[in-house]
Amino acid sequence: MKLMLHIVAGFPSLKESEQIARTILKTGVEYLEVQIPFSDPIADGPVIVEANQVAINKGTRTSDAFKIVENLKKDFPNAKLLLMTYCNILKQFGFEKFCKEARRVGSYGLIIPDIPIEEEASTNYLALCKKNKLHAIQVVSPITPDKRLKKIARVASGFVYCVARFGVTGASASVAPKINSYLRRVRLSIKLPLAVGFGISKRKDIETLKKQADIAVVGTQVIREFKKGGLTKVKSFCESLR
């Protein structure tokens, strides 16, 4: 199973956030989410919310996150680097300009959890991603009905991000007990690789997922490990997930 880890650009500083990213990628992690900090990250739990606020307080800008991705892509050309944020950031930056810049710096795709596919008429988000050869990663949850899964399947690319449970990131100590039946249901409609996140923090969680998922997503725990012991702790944590 492949891994996708998560950093917040600008936490605890711009320099250190890039160092965390480099430490992660040096362990062979295949996917990395670089979160552009936002003042109201509705899908995130308190640990990542706090990290967002720290980054904002230090003046982190959207352009800083792009620069981190650009720097990482030069040294880790095979890594799949994704920009994650919320719709208001794209509105402020300009949807077309944002997608062009994401492509320029080498982003694999975008994860924008508060842009549902129904918003295409007003934002042209999916069309702009396609034009710029970016994967617009779609998000589903255990309460997503089958009819909607089929609708998402028609526009999804890259992989589909499956929320392991209903709630926010980092709010649970382990993955939901019925995760495999949920993922089997998703697979009936969606044939792309499935990434699973929310509540994954250790190797045991990944073992639970390996029969049905393709990518395990770990976010909050990266920040916790950094707070415990800096880059050394992040490195050993990433190695433990293998």
Image (spheres, rainbow, N blue to C red):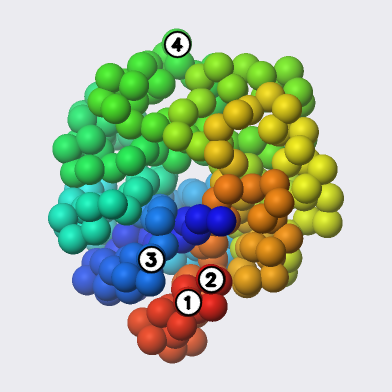
Label 1, residues with CA under 10 Å away: few <14, some 14-19, many ≥20: some
Residue identified by numbered label 3: 28
Label 1: which secondary element: helix
CA separation in Å, label 4 and label 2: 42 Å
Residue type at numbered disc 1: Glu
Label 3, residues with CA under 10 Å away: few <14, some 14-19, many ≥20: some
Q: Which mark is residue 242?
A: 2
Residue identified by numbered label 1: 239
Q: Quadrant of residue 132?
A: top left
Label 4: which secondary element: helix
Q: Give the x, y percent position of residue 133.
A: 29, 27
Asked if marks 1 and 4 touch (Cβ < 8 Å), the reply is no
- Residue 14 position (above or below residue 187): below
Q: Is residue 64 visible?
A: no
The quadrant of the image that shows the N terminus is bottom right
Label 3: which secondary element: loop
Residue at image point 75% right, 23% down: 146
